[in-house]
């Protein structure tokens, strides 16, 4: 097991950087020989990061039998796998990785307006709406995508229309206070889901008074009539508190998880384990 742990350590940044090039190439050569013996093409190539991912997955499979149980354990494994694929830029993230070299935790905002400034402006406009002083034709702007949203949305204004806010308040019971700081919440989410082209779902750290995380569904790059103009925007279509079961299910069954903030996401799943029986029961009703 000690050997497996050492090799698995190569999947972590610090260990990999310290590996001697000759040793790594020998390991890589042995792995390619193994693939060819299994019938794969002799012209097949594998990148260093792809091999690191294989080593990581192999080690996880060795050490995890029986470790995670129940529906949340499956979700945690899926989330960890997506996080590692994203980190190493393999699988569906291979092309994306060539365009984005920064780690997710170190993203810098490319827009002139900082996310804090967006929060201040957004909160001010939200208060005007809550007090009933906003014109019927107006909407609230969250500015252009920042942080991780730059990867999932075109560089178009994110808008929040009044009818969506009214629905969030009347149908979902959210107050103006619970919907504050949405720009920063979208920029630093817990999970990002994508079930279909043209839309993303974002689980934020914002909490409702009932303790549910606030979820935002966004139509991306869609045309909306704002005033007298048709404008391409990122349109928030829904804001509501999301039950734990309705977050766990997409991770496990639908394969729609596209990104997670690794520390926040796995911590969220870990904290949810205290309600595991209720989650299993609720999920069966969906």
Image (cartoon, grey):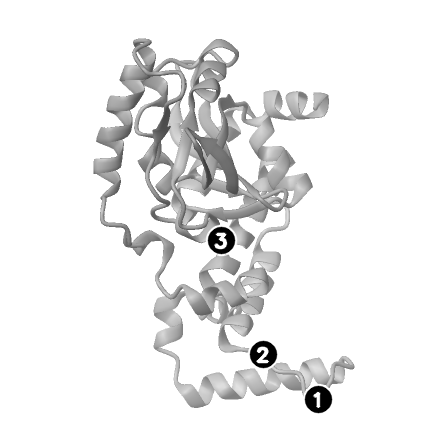
Contact (CB < 8 A) between labels 2 and 3? Answer: no
Compared with residue 191, is residue 89 higher up or lower down, i.e. above or below?
below
Q: Residues within 10 Å of mark 2 (few under 14, many from 20)?
A: few
In percent of the image, x 35 and y 16: which residue is there?
135
Q: Which residue position is annotated with label 3?
A: 83
What label does residue 139 carry, if any? none
- Find residue 240 and report its horizontal and vertical position in percent: 49, 22
Q: Is residue 224 left or right of residue 178?
A: right
What label does residue 42 carry, if any? 1
Compared with residue 136, is residue 274 higher up or lower down, i.e. above or below?
below
In percent of the image, x 49 and y 66: which residue is there?
8
In percent of the image, x 47 and y 49: which residue is there?
152
Mark 3 or mark 1: whose residue is earlier in sequence: 1
Asked whether residue 171 is in view, the answer is yes
- Between 203 and 165, the one lying in front of the other is 165
Q: Which residue position is annotated with label 2?
A: 46
Label 1 and label 2: CA atoms lie apart by 11 Å
Q: Is residue 240 left or right of residue 281?
A: left
Where does the C terminus fall, quadrant-wise?
top right
Mark 2 or mark 3: whose residue is earlier in sequence: 2
SS class, disc 1? loop
- Find residue 52 and report its horizontal and vertical position in percent: 51, 70
- Between 115 and 188, the one lying in front of the other is 115
Asked whether residue 9 is in view, the answer is no
Label 3 and label 1: CA atoms lie apart by 30 Å
Q: Is residue 132 left or right of residue 50?
A: left
């Amino acid at each position: 097991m000690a050997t497996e742990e050492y090799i698995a350590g190569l999947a972590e940044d610090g260990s990999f950087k310290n590996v001697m090039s000759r040793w790594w190439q020998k390991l890589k050569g042995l792995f390619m020989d193994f693939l060819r013996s299994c019938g794969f093409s002799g012209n097949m190539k594998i990148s260093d990061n792809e091999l690191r991912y294989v080593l990581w997955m192999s080690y996880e499979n060795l050490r995890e039998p029986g470790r995670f149980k129940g529906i949340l354990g499956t979700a945690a494994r899926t989330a960890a796998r997506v996080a590692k694929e994203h980190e190493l830029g393999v699988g569906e993230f291979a092309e994306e990785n060539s365009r984005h070299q920064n780690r997710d935790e170190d993203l810098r905002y490319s827009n002139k307006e900082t996310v804090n400034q967006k929060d201040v402006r957004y909160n001010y406009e939200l208060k005007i709406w809550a007090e009933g002083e906003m014109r019927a034709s107006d909407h609230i702007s969250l500015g252009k995508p920042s942080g991780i949203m730059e990867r999932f949305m075109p560089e178009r204004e994110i808008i929040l229309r009044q009818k969506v806010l009214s629905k969030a308040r009347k149908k979902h019971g959210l107050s103006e206070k619970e919907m504050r700081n949405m720009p920063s919440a979208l920029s630093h989410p817990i999970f990002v889901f994508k079930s279909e082209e043209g839309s993303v779902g974002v689980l934020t750290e914002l909490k409702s008074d009932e303790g549910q995380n606030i979820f935002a569904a966004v139509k991306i790059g869609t045309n909306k009539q704002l005033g007298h103009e048709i404008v391409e925007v990122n349109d928030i279509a829904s804001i509501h508190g999301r039950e734990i079961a309705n977050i766990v299910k997409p991770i496990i069954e639908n394969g729609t998880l596209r990104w997670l903030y690794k520390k926040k996401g796995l911590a969220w799943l870990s904290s949810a384990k205290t309600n595991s029986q209720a989650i299993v029961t609720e999920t069966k009703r969906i």
